[in-house]
Amino acid sequence: MPKNILPHGLHKTCWLLLLTVLLFLITLSAPYWVPHDPYLQNLDLALQAPSAEYPFGTDRYGRCVFSRVLVGGQSSIFSALALVGIIFTTGTAAGLWSGYYGGKLDNFIMRLSDIFLAFPGLVFAIAVASILGGGMTNAVLALAVISWPKYARLARSQALTVRQQPY
């Protein structure tokens, strides 16, 4: 039996990375190879069970669920990427500024992050989303508003560690 040449855990990471890339490519190319129009309604086909023609069946309006899942994956994946990008850049920048400059700026940013962390995340996100209004962009912004303090605290701690080094 051949011995696994990859370090412990790397084998699983490679499979997960391959799966992520495959999912990303399928989602990117989904509009070009969906079997049916995901928005076309046909009430004669409503609530059909899965079959060869409709792999996931149809919904109550007769739309192909498989096509809708493929096309809907685009907004899900890209909004999640946008959310992580916004949270990462905002939180990291705030944490680095806070940790590097210190003083009143550090105190202000960390007290602001304490305020955001004091509220339950989902309740606060719903409140922010209700203020901003509906839509995917506002949902991403609402989640970004409540999620940046975790990155800020981590970046601040790393900046303080590096700042204390005797270079």
Image: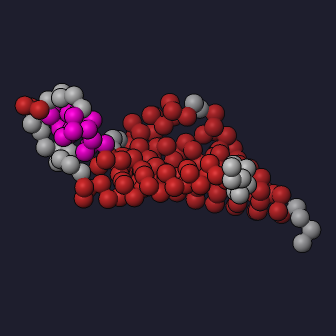
User: In the current view of this chain or complex, which residue is farthest to the left?
Assistant: 44
Q: Is residue 38 left or right of residue 104?
A: left
Which range of residues does the magenta coloring cover? Answer: 51-69
Residue drawn where x is 45% and y is 39% of the image:
128
**Which percent across, then down, holds residue 105?**
71, 56
User: In the current view of this chain or complex, which residue is farthest to the bottom?
Assistant: 167
Figure quadrant of residue 116: top right
User: Where the C terminus falls, by quadrant?
Assistant: bottom right
Q: Is residue 129 above or below residue 90?
A: above
Residue drawn where x is 70% and y is 56% of the image:
6
Q: Is residue 76 left or right of residue 61?
A: right
Figure quadrant of residue 45: top left
**Which percent across, then down, holds residue 146?**
55, 42
Q: Is residue 108 visible?
A: no
User: In the current view of this chain or complex, which residue is farthest to the front?
Assistant: 1
Which is more toward the observer, 105 or 64?
A: 64
The image's colouring method is secondary structure
Which is more toward the observer, 144 or 41?
A: 41
**Which percent across, then down, holds residue 66?**
27, 41
Figure quadrant of residue 5: bottom right
Q: Is residue 157 above or below residue 50?
A: below
Q: Is residue 114 above or below residue 96?
A: above
Q: Is residue 78 left or right of residue 155?
A: left
Residue drawn where x is 9% and y is 36% of the image:
42
